Image: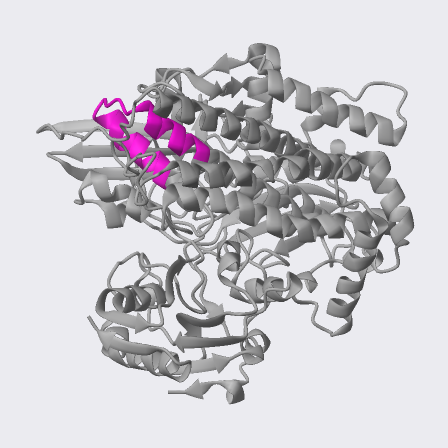
């Protein structure tokens, strides 16, 4: 449930579909291996959309970690910030739920736009097969994803140390 | 003249569902529904511990998380012939109800209302006239003109900033849009309010399920919530009081906004109470069990052949043989090997892709049948079954909704229940069912509180896995209709697992005997005003609340302008 923490890290993706699960694997790793001061909120967002609205708010800084198709080489790690996220993402609304771009629009429409937002994206190699394992390429950049997440949190004033 | 239109992908439909229609003289003459993504959860589950299956099944879909968790634990419990503590039933029931309320409201307001409501038209409404109209329709507390003015100003700012965002895909000014500006403004106000309401319903799930969006508290044998009225770590009185408070905030919206709005839309689009019936063999299952074994239920379910409620045949228990033996899945027109028509226990999932073949294979969705025939599932099937079974709340709320339509349209005759066999009837049934879910939420809350007060704190019976083979199935009347999971366990490990999901029933391609599926049948004779903008196809398909192969959600960089991406 949404807590009072001002910094929220949300991992998105489907762990059943290879590299699609990178965001969720990353936040699980953060939760298991690190302590944060002040406390932050870590969310396994799965493939949800609107369910994540409660984590948005004008006082919140939100770090999203997800597989993103940048049209770059598999394993490329990239970051998008604030309004650039919405400007870059495909606005199509999914049939079954509202995607990330819709969620950001709705947060604005319902006066919940986050103070700060960064999307840490990873270009996946494969997400076509039902497999809990990520590809070697993405496993190879996993540490880089974690390091960048910790760096961004550091810039937001969060001290981190290993458990 | 016949012209083929292909809706793939279409506004508010991703590539997962493709609809093809032949349009002849402005009407749909032939239709095909094609699932564009393969799913086969069993490949991941085979060989695993059956107690863990729910953790994986709730990842099948981003919306239907809890429903797959519920169906999965029920399935394993059925295979082991278990009883579970009534406290666990009540807690699960409250999660089911809260999730369903959330899901139905989001579907109507956020995923399909824009098929009927023109947001741009709301900008030219007179807020005072809207307020007056709203007050004549209901006692909802937010009917004041200042509130409508505030909503209109907000929409103007949003649209004025060029940021249409979530509204960008609407068919503004389409000739099939019929609501006056004031009605559009009322609907827009409720569209915004619904974001808050769905959040409250969702919070109930979060409190009871320990986390969102994936509940953590399911277990084969019950739930893992310890109940202790005095403990901070358990489901305690403070948390239950929060649930009660949230519940109380839902009621007015359901009765005074949702049900009324659906009746208003139906009144302005009466044609759509005539289009879209399609397959009229309806299947639903009973839910909200209140005993440990699953023989007493809060909401009835069953089979209605040919839309004739007098022929209603109830499904009465978990493990019901009529249901168990009635289900088969045909792959004759689906992209799997061969043309088998098998019971889910024997189900096979060997992909065999061909191109889209009008008369051959054309979908990743198998065609389920009940008693050898396609069946429509969903809130309409459930409401008709509850109506046929004499369920009091269903009959009362259906009566209120139909009377509202009669009053608004100034009809001299009563509006018959048969109007529900239609595109807008499915929306009306969903609204009626939301009121039933609310009643179940309140009822199960009271049952839980009373049982705890009586001293029963049990929430879990540990499962025991005997050697050898067991088979079982579990069903759940999910927001989109009948969901069933089927399992074969061998020596404590999963040997086969099949999920027959609601949208499989409705989105089914032609079956073993080439009979068309519910989506396909419902599109026949729908008018198409503009073949370039087939809004009417969307209206009918959206009315089913389609949800297909939700596993993939990769974000695509739309413009491929990479200047804003910091490569790390």
Residue B295 lies left or right of residue A92; in this view the side is: left
The residue located at (26%, 49%) in the rendering is B43
Q: Residue furthest front?
A: B230
Q: Could you tell me if residue B515 is visible in this image?
A: yes
Where B20 sits versus B313, above or below?
below
**What colouring does the structure picture have?**
one colour
The residue closer to the viewer here, B340 or A121, is A121
Residue B100 part of the magenta-drawn span: no
Q: Quadrant of residue B155?
A: bottom right
Instruction: Tell me: residue B280, above or below residue B118.
Output: above
The percent coordinates of residue B356 (x first, y second) are: 50, 53
Q: Nearer the viewer, residue B380 or A28?
A: A28
Q: Percent from the top left, x then y, of residue B505?
A: 48, 35
- Residue A24 percent location from the top left of the image: 34, 63
Whether residue B20 appears in this view of the structure is no
> Which secondary structure dominates the residues rendered in magenta?
helix
State the count of labels. Answer: 0
Percent across and percent down for residue B207 are 42, 44
Measuring 41% from the left and 87% from the top, which residue is drawn there? B567
Indicate the quadrant where residue B13 lies.
bottom right
Task: Indicate left or right for A29 with B524 as reference.
Answer: left
The image quadrant where one finds the C terminus of chain A is bottom left
Compared to residue A127, the image places residue B66 above or below, namely: above
In the image, what residue occupies the spot 53% across and 58% down?
Answer: A53
Region rendered in magenta: B69-94
On the picture, is A71 further left or further right than A17?
right
């Amino acid at each position: 449930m949404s807590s009072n923490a001002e910094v929220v890290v949300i991992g998105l993706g489907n762990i059943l579909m290879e590299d699609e699960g990178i965001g969720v694997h990353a936040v699980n790793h953060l939760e298991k291996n690190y302590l944060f001061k002040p406390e932050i909120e870590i969310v396994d967002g799965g493939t949800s959309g609107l369910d994540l609205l409660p984590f948005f708010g004008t006082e919140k800084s939100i770090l999203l970690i997800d597989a993103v198709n940048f049209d770059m080489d598999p394993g490329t790690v990239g970051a998008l910030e604030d309004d650039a996220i919405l400007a870059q993402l495909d606005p199509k609304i999914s049939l079954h739920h509202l995607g990330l771009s819709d969620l950001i629009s709705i947060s604005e429409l319902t006066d919940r736009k986050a103070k700060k937002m960064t999307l840490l994206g990873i270009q996946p190699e494969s997400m076509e097969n039902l497999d809990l394992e990520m590809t070697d390429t993405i496993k190879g950049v996993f540490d880089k994803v974690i390091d960048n997440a910790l760096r961004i949190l550091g810039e937001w004033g969060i001290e981190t140390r290993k458990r | 003249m016949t012209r083929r239109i292909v809706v793939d992908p279409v506004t508010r439909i991703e590539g997962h569902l493709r609809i093809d229609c032949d349009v002849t003289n402005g009407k749909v003459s032939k239709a095909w529904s094609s699932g564009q993504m393969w799913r086969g959860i069993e490949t991941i589950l085979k060989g695993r511990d059956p107690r863990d299956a729910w953790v994986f099944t709730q990842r099948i879909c981003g919306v239907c998380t809890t429903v797959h968790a519920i169906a999965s634990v029920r399935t394993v419990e059925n295979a082991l012939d278990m009883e579970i503590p009534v406290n666990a039933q009540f807690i699960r029931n409250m999660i089911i109800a809260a999730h369903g309320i959330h899901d139905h409201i989001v579907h109507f307001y956020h995923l399909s209302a824009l098929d009927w409501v023109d947001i741009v038209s709301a900008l030219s409404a007179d807020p005072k006239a809207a307020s007056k109209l709203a007050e004549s329709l209901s006692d909802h507390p937010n009917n004041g003109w200042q509130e409508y003015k505030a909503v209109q100003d907000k929409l103007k700012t949003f649209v004025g900033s060029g940021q249409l965002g979530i509204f960008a895909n609407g068919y503004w000014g389409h000739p099939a849009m019929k609501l006056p500006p004031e009605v559009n403004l009322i609907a827009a106000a409720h569209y915004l309010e619904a974001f808050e309401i769905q959040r409250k319903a969702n919070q109930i799930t979060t409190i009871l399920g320990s986390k969102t969006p994936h509940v953590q508290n399911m277990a084969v044998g019950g739930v893992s919530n310890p109940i202790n009225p005095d403990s901070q770590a358990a489901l305690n009185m403070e948390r239950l009081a929060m649930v009660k408070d949230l519940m109380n905030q839902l009621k007015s919206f359901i009765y005074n906004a949702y049900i009324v709005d659906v009746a208003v839309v139906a009144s302005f689009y009466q044609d759509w109470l005539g289009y879209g019936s399609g397959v009229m063999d309806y299947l639903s299952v009973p839910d909200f069990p209140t005993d440990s074994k699953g023989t007493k239920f809060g909401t009835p379910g069953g089979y209605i052949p040919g839309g004739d409620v007098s022929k209603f045949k109830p499904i009465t228990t978990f493990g019901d043989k009529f249901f168990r033996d009635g289900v088969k899945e045909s792959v004759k027109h689906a992209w799997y090997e061969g043309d088998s028509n098998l019971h889910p226990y024997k189900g096979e999932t060997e992909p065999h892709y061909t191109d889209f073949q009008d008369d051959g294979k054309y979908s990743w969705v198998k065609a389920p049948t009940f008693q050898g025939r396609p069946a429509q599932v969903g809130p309409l099937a459930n409401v008709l079954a509850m109506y046929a079974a004499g369920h009091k709340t269903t009959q009362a709320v259906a009566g209120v909704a139909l009377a509202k339509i009669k009053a608004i349209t100034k009809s001299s005759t009563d509006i018959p229940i048969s109007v529900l066999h239609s595109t807008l009837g499915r929306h009306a049934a969903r609204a009626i069912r939301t009121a039933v879910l609310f009643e179940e939420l309140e009822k199960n809350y009271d049952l839980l509180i009373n049982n705890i007060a009586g001293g029963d704190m049990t929430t879990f019976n540990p499962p025991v896995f005997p050697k050898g083979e067991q088979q079982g199935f579990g069903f759940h009347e999910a927001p989109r209709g009948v969901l069933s999971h089927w399992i074969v366990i061998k020596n404590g490990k999963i040997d086969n697992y099949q999920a027959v999901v609601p949208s499989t029933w409705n989105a089914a391609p032609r079956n073993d005997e080439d009979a068309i599926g519910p989506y396909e049948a419902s599109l026949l004779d729908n008018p198409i005003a503009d073949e370039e903008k087939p809004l009417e196809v969307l209206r009918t398909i959206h009315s089913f609340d389609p949800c297909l192969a939700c596993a993939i959600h990769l974000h695509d960089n739309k413009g491929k302008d990479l200047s804003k991406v910091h490569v790390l």
